[in-house]
Amino acid sequence: DSAVRRVLLREERLVFAMHQSHPWAHNHEGLYLAEVADQNLMLYPNTPKPNFSTQILALLSEHGLEPKHHKIVREIQLALGLVAAGEGVAIVPESSKAILIPGLHYIPLLDNDAVSPIFLATRSMDDSDYIHSLFDCIYQIYDEEGIPYQRYQAWARIAWRMRLEQRLLHKYAKIFYAISVYLHVIFSTNYLL
């Protein structure tokens, strides 16, 4: 949709979530995606696609993998609850490690492309101060937390260009108004003569 601009904020690493009794649960070095193909994989959400589950299936497909057993559930909390109950494993964003459920272990994924893009969607022509403040706030949090990201520079250029165009339009509007007043005076004067 041309009315919506998607800005990549960062790419978040993916991790395996598994029950503490799983044979890989104490592998702190990490695992590769190829090792998940034989596992009972919990995916989420089951909302209209595309979504996170389609992203994970596409990532597996890019590696030539197709999970033999997978279940798509409503949300991440349900997927992690099933994993904590020993019903399978899940691939989740690294920030999910903040969800502390007893018996749940998170293991790093070692594949370089095992990331999930995080986007912010805005209206394409929206140049409000609120949007700029939101970007500033997000980048400030990333800086404070030491989260790697690449600042969206194009946003600043677009905003600058839009403000320049507004100033030029305002300036030319004043000029055209002055010309129209001048012409009105000339024609009014000539008409009276």
Image: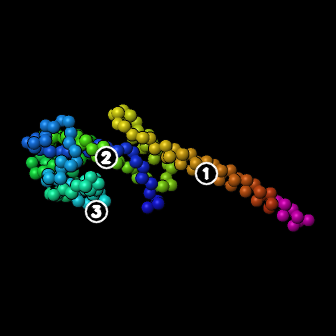
Task: State whether residue 139 appears in this view.
Answer: yes
Look at the numbered discs 1 and 3 and tell me whether their residues touch, using CB distance below 8 Å: no
Q: Secondary structure at mark 1?
A: helix
SS at circle 2: loop
Magenta residue check for 190 = yes
> Which is in the foreground here, disc 1 or disc 3?
3
Separation of marks 1 and 3 at Cα, in angstroms: 40 Å
Left of 190 or right of it: where is 48?
A: left
The kind of residue tagged 1 is Gln
Q: Which residue is mark 3?
A: 48
**Magenta extent:** 185-193
- Quadrant that contains the N terminus: bottom left
Q: Are marks 2 and 1 in contact (CB under 8 Å)?
A: no
**Mark closest to the chain's N terminus, 2 or 1:** 2
Give whichever of 185, 57 is nearer the camera.
57
* Dominant secondary structure of the residues highlighted in magenta in the image: helix
Of tags 3 and 2, the one toward the viewer is: 2
Residue 148 in the image, given as x and y percentages of width and height: 37, 37
Amino acid of disc 3: Pro
**Residue 25 on the magenta segment:** no
Q: Is residue 10 left or right of residue 164?
A: left
Give coordinates of residue 118: x percent, y percent: 35, 48
Residue 96, position as x, y percentages in the image: 24, 43
Q: Amino acid at mark 2?
A: Asp
- Label annotation for residue 166: 1
Q: Is 181 or 131 nearer to us in this picture?
A: 131
Secondary element at image label 3: loop
Q: Find disc 2 in the rendering and name its residue.
A: 113
Which residue is more in the foreground, 50 or 167?
Answer: 50
Res. 140 image quadrant: top left
Q: Residue at x 31, y 46 (%)?
A: 113
| Residue extending farthest right | 193
